[in-house]
Amino acid sequence: MQKIKKFVGEHPQWTSWIVLAVGMVAILIWSARDVGLLPGQWAALIIATILVAGLAVWIIGWEDEDDVEEDESPPPQRKGADKPSETSV
């Protein structure tokens, strides 16, 4: 159990991809069970579903990367902030 918690903490996007892919494949299998697809068609649909789940997690991660970059960048310097003020009391 500790290995799973460590993996989830270190790799949140991989974890999201796995969980989303499992859920999407389950929904795919449930909804297409009576269609009569051939094994090759099932394989193609499942692979495409897994790739779509990965793409969705990657796109959602764009916003997280922007937030991290903003947090790590130093605050903007004001013009003349390093110079002492000309007016003294």
Image (spheres, rainbow, N blue to C red):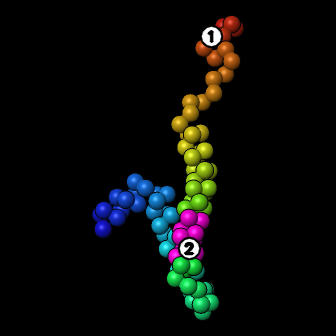
| Residue 5 position within the rendered picture, expressed as x and y whole percent measured from the top left | 36, 62
* Disc 1 secondary structure class: loop
Quadrant the N terminus occupies: bottom left
Q: Residues within 10 Å of mark 1 (few under 14, many from 20)?
A: few
Kind of residue at disc 2: Ala
Name the quadrant containing residue 9: bottom left
| Residue displayed at 53% across by 70% down | 47
Q: Is 33 included in the stretch rendered in magenta?
A: no
Please name the residue that numbered disc 2 is placed on.
Answer: 44
Assign the magenta stretch its main secondary structure.
helix
Query: Residue 3 vs residue 51: left or right?
Result: left
| Residue displayed at 49% across by 69% down | 19
| Residue 82 position within the rendered picture, expressed as x and y whole percent measured from the top left | 60, 14
Would you say residue 13 is visible in this rendering? yes
Q: Nearer the viewer, residue 5 or 49?
A: 49
Name the quadrant containing residue 2: bottom left
* Disc 2 secondary structure class: helix
Please name the residue that numbered disc 1 is placed on.
Answer: 83
Looking at the rendering, the stretch of residues picked out in magenta corresponds to 43-53
